[in-house]
Image (cartoon, grey):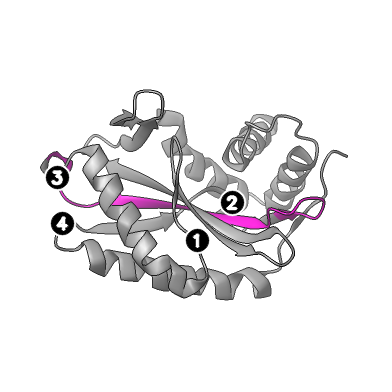
Amino acid sequence: MVHDYQFVPRAEWLPVRKELEELIHCVQNEVRKYFTFSYTYVGSSHRNLITRDNKSNIGYDFDVNLHINDDNDDYTPKQIRTILRNALDKHSYKYGYGHCEDSTRVLTIKSKDTFFSRIKHSCDFCIVFDCNDGRQQYIHFNKKQNAYNWYFLPVSNNELENRAQWIKDHGHWQELKSLYLFKKNNNTDPNKKSRSLYAEAINEIINIY
């Protein structure tokens, strides 16, 4: 076994999520003069499948989509992402987080235990826009070109949660949890993130049944 992922107890992550939501509400108020947004948990965060690798020092994480409610033509992708990043930086320290890290797809905040040199928990924010035709865009950061653009998410991503709900409704949820944990513990590709492993597990269960 490459890793030692275990599910984080609800009693541990729930208070953290409540504080995280307080932070998001602060950010909503901060950016209201520019635009408004709603938020949803996605992937393992949405389905309460939060895990932590006991062999590592990176803790556990949440995945949150920030849905821009207003017409995204009013601001450029770079302006939207900068406004949100600055707002997160302004308020995140109140809840024990450091400055935002700006990666290709998400903004990340981390709560660190400096004494033990480890990350206690973190949150990835993906900035999205829901189109009228049912598709979804997200702000993509091209580091080489220092450019921010709206990219369409694959249609399959929009159907993922419907598949997960089918699995739950038909009594296969425990199988999904076991398969998801197995995939995380045996994953040798550092570039393959939890959301990809979660999607793989869902699709495999769907194919079986």
Q: Residue under label 1, please give it.
A: 98
- Which amino acid type corresponds to the residue marked 2 in the rendered image? Ser
For residue 9, which quarter of the picture? bottom right
CA gap, disc 4 and disc 1:
24 Å
Q: Nearer the viewer's eye, disc 4 or disc 3? A: 4
Residue where numbered disc 4 is placed: 34
The alpha-carbon separation of the residues under discs 2 and 1 comes to 23 Å
Q: Which residue is mark 3?
A: 71
Numbered mark located on residue 44 in the image: 2
Which mark sits nearer the N-terminus, 4 or 3?
A: 4
Earlier in the chain: of badge 3 and badge 1, it is 3
Q: Nearer the viewer, mark 2 or mark 1?
A: 1
Q: Position of residue 41 (x, y in %)?
A: 47, 56
Quadrant of the rendering where the N terminus is positioned: top right
Specify which label sits upstream in the sequence, 4 or 1. Answer: 4
Along the line of sight, which residue is nearer the eye, 188 or 118? 118
Question: Where residue 193 sits: x, y (%)?
Answer: 61, 38
The three-letter code of the residue at mark 1 reads Gly
Q: Nearer the viewer, residue 7 or 192?
A: 192
Mark closest to the chain's N terminus, 2 or 4: 4
Dot placed on the residue nearer the N-terminal end, 2 or 1? 2
Which residues, given as a range, are shown in magenta? 52-73
Mark closer to the observer (2, 4): 4
- Closer to the chain start, of discs 2 and 3, is 2
Indicate left or right for 146 with 170 as reference: left
Residue at coordinates 79% horizontally, 42% vertically from top-left?
Answer: 185
Kind of element beneath mark 2: helix
Mark 2 or 3, closer to the camera: 3
Is 62 a magenta residue? Answer: yes
Question: Is 96 within the magenta?
Answer: no
